[in-house]
Amino acid sequence: MDIESLNNAYLDLFINNKEEFLDDFKNKLWPELEASSVRYKGRPVPFLYHPFMLDRTEWNRLKELVYHFNEILYKVIARYINNSEFRSYFPFSEEMEEYILLEPGYSNPYPVARFDLFYYQDSIKFCELNTDGTSAMNEVRGIQEIVANSAAVTQFKEDNNLELKGFELFDSLIDIMLEKYNEFLSNKAHPEVDFNKDKPVIGIVDFSKDGTISEFKEFQRWFDKRGILSYIIDPRDVENKDDGLYYNNKRVDFVYRRATTSRLFDHFDEIQDFLSAYKEGKFCMFGSFRSQIIHNKAIFQILSTGEYVDFLDESDLQFIADHIPETCLLTEATIEKKQIKSQKNDYILKPDDGFACKGIKLGKESDQNDWEEFVDDAVCKPYLCQSYCQPPTRKMISIDNDKTGIDLYYYQIGLYVFDGQVHGIYNRAGREKIIGSSYECFTVPTYIVSKSE
């Protein structure tokens, strides 16, 4: 299926009927969003009135790609668990390492993840692995529903005899949570804890004012549908008792961890009850600390260093060469060796454990003096230097106040990976080369397109 032609057909339809569709956006779509739970830091999430389409061939290609990447990452995690020298390559504290090494009670070290990547016509480059507190599923759910039922997309589907299929991310993830819980009960349940077998009491755990509360409440709504009791819990507010983990005198069987590992260990002394209960196997935690092994951006440096990954086979190493941007730790030696200061357009600098694009510095967008000053400052911190991959682009509809037009957007897709399988896509776009909440960023509803039967 010719996606570019379909995209152009949508652009033509929209521009030829822009007054009607602008009115639809302002008076129907945006009010629906404002009334929904799709919010970030209390505000409605901005989105593009544009269906980003992939065909089945592209979708299957992405699933096969993630299958191979998972096989590599599982090997890396196993190596970390079993080899102390390999562990020394990672920037983790002794306390964090201790908890990473704990057996979680189920087999998959990262049962929920989002792999962010740049998807070009002829190649794919991974740019970030979110295996720790994976978020934005509610954005995908809400925005794809709103746009799929819009006037423009309804007309577009009818005119071109198309079906656009979105992604279901809540029920499928809860199914996997319950599978991991049952696996935990059979492997590691604490003998003094009388776990609820069929319907565990669930704690959605993150620090107050840190997490996306609207998404947590949406998960609670889906838990409620199944008759499962859940609480939103700050990890500082729990108690480790003889017979389990407690919150407000209610025992919690299962923790859906949304607080990142680094954030938890920043508050190490304040969450000792939470950590000791985990160590003692008094609750099942969905998203074990082992996810940190590949969540930290140092994984890209590890994969880029041949002597570190000499246990991988030739097909794995070729995959890394094809899909992982070359990455190194920013040191005085690498600055000189790779000419990082003089070749600024070739590089991007990233904190090793940052998020939301905070602290990122792009050489192409910096003047020479500013770049050199940033490099000199960053070398004293845990920063990574990565070969710059310019995000792919696609023409999409822009609505700025009362104006409608077509702009070229950079975009980045994230693949939701549940228990090793790709389940959906999170797509963000902007007109700047860095896409994230600290920059211009729109959520783009994404669909698998096919001809109607």
Image: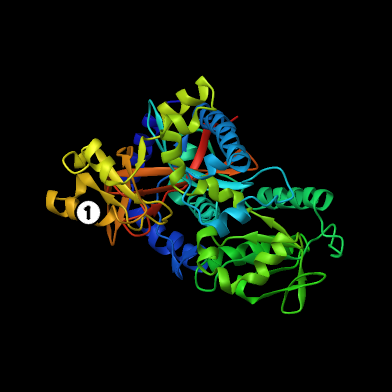
Q: Nearer the viewer, residue 395 or 330?
A: 330
Q: Secondary structure at mark 1?
A: helix
Report the quarter where the C terminus lies: top right
Residue located 65% across and 65% down the image: 275
Q: Give how far across and how far down residue 389 sits, in percent.
A: 31, 37
Report the residue marked by disc 1.
376
Q: Give how far across and how far down residue 196 sits, in percent.
A: 84, 62
Q: Give how far across and how far down residue 423 sits, in percent.
A: 60, 41
Q: Nearer the viewer, residue 153 or 353?
A: 353
Mark yes or no: residue 162 visible: no
Position of residue 217 in the picture relative to residue 41 (left or right):
right
Q: Nearer the viewer, residue 120 or 373?
A: 373
Q: Is residue 339 above or below residue 114?
A: above
The amino acid on which the numbered mark 1 sits, given as a three-letter code, is: Asp
Q: Nearer the viewer, residue 16 or 208?
A: 208
Q: Give how far across and how far down residue 180 sits, in percent.
A: 74, 49
Residue located 55% across and 58% down the image: 261
Position of residue 281 in the picture relative to residue 197 (left or right):
left
